[in-house]
Amino acid sequence: MNLLETFDSLLASWQAVFSQLRMFERARRLTFGLLSCLRLHLTSTAICAGGRQFVDWSADYRLCSRSPWEPYRLFDPIFDHLPSLLASPTAPVIAALDDTLCKKTGRHIPGVSMARDPMSPPFHVNLCYGLRFLQLSVLVSPLSAPGPARALPVRFDPAPPARKPKKNASAELWQAYQQQKKQQTLPRAGVKAMASVRQSLDECAATHHRQLMVSGDASYTHRTVLRNLPPRTTYIGRIRKDAKLHGPLPAEVHKSAGRPRRYGSLAPTPEQILKDDAVPIHRVPCFAAGQLREIPVKALSPLYWRKAGADLPLQLVVIKPLGYRLRNGSKLLYRQPAFLICTDLDLSLQTLVQSYVNRWEIECNHRDEKSLLGVAQGQVRNPHAVRRLPQLQVAGYSLLLLASLLSSGFQRTAEYLPLPKWRRKSIRPSLLDLLALLRDQIFARVSDTPPLLNFDDFKTVPPAAAKPSKQPLASDTLCTFAA
């Protein structure tokens, strides 16, 4: 099957999510319209892209605001096809965790808050209004040969901060705000997302026994995350270079007055381990930046971190900075080192480092979702629609990536449109390639069997003989798909 047929077959599994068939058809049309529209990715633009701008559109707007359906179940096709994308029946499920901010202009939209603009320069922090979402993506790699990984989003949960009351608010409101502020933090939202993914893996017979490995940045390397991991879950995260770590407690400890010791002697900081030549260096082969490289790392275990607790041993991995040149013959520059901790002491260094290197793919997800798909561009104010419409867009985007893997694999085949002459050869298809191929196949199907406009819910009035009949513009019907 081609990309369009594979993607449509994956969308067919959404019938169990919705209580009625007509609701599923609306969700299917809206997903195709949001992916294939050429302007702003709004509900109205998606309706026009589906060729339904002359029929009753009110039900399409009520799909995300009133219709009862669970957004988590939109990602179930990813878990159903996940065993076929993994290397072996015992291979772990590797995922990446991160949050993103979708800019908004309306201050009265539910969940909108003031946050730091991630695109602001480091020397001048700017603020903006936006919706904060937490995303968890499953990372899959080619099975035949080392290659770039692909991140398939499986969760896109809203994570708004607590709303601060006014200065003259009552003491009860301020006390409730302090409690809500502790509950609506990013580490707690990350734990909730990991527990939800772990539950989805347990519901599938082929993945319930697999280990879940989640990699996150320093904002999630927190006591809340490390102490509340779901069962059969490993966490890999960044840590400060000056973190205070301790060695294991000696077997024979002399009793003394006071509280019993829980930690051993103070261990060197991650930065000191980086500069210590006595710690051996391991060359770990990993695929990064387009080719297989040997990354120098240092590992030390078991270590204990006071924020994680005395009963949680950790593995410390220090990745030395890699050298690179901007052009041939230029000065050799170095990247920044990375300091990681892992909750699994027996995890191999290659799997650990490769899992964290592949975490960059979730950043590519954020770029595609906000720049090319227009996630959260919809002008909605209903609390349910504010949460569901972005999740519907991300679920459609994830199924499109899965459809490309099932139809053509990880490689960019001859099925895709040719690249411009100034573009270098690409290893895998980008989202622009997928959208261009999807629109091309949609337009080819429409050219063979043009869709019929259905004017249900409207009174049919025959046009006057002298007055020309209105026809959809070519720009509106370019991305029209057959209903």
Image: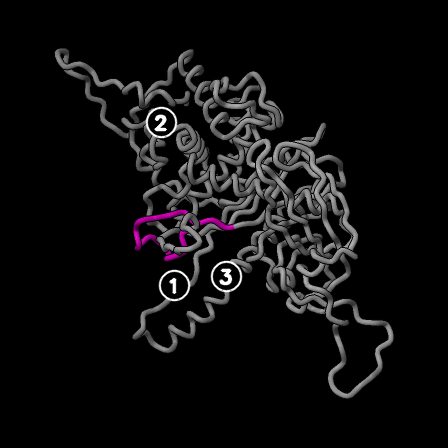
User: Which numbered disc, 3 or 2, marks the residue that appears first in the sequence?
Assistant: 2
Give the x, y percent position of residue 142: 67, 31
- Regarding mark 1 in the picture, which secondary structure is present there? loop
The residue indicated by pointer 1 is 163
Residue bounds of the magenta highlight: 99-117
The spot of residue 443 in percent (x, y) is: 41, 17
Task: Give the label on residue 49, or none.
Answer: 2
Q: Is residue 155 above or below residue 147?
A: below
Q: Residue at coordinates 61% horizontally, 48% vertically from top-left?
A: 197
Which residue is nearer to you in this view: 73 or 149?
Answer: 149
Describe the element under mark 2 as helix, strand or loop.
Answer: helix
In magenta segment, residue 116: yes
Identified at 68% across, 49% down, the residue is 319
Callout 3 amino acid = Thr
Are the two marked residues, 1 and 3, in contact with CB atoms closer than 8 angstroms?
no
Of residue 480 and residue 449, the one placed in the foreground of this image is: 480
Quadrant where the N terminus sits is top right
Q: Magenta span has 206?
A: no
Q: Which residue is mark 3?
A: 185
How busy is the neighbourhood of tag 2: few (under 14 within 10 Å), some, or many (20 plus)? Answer: many
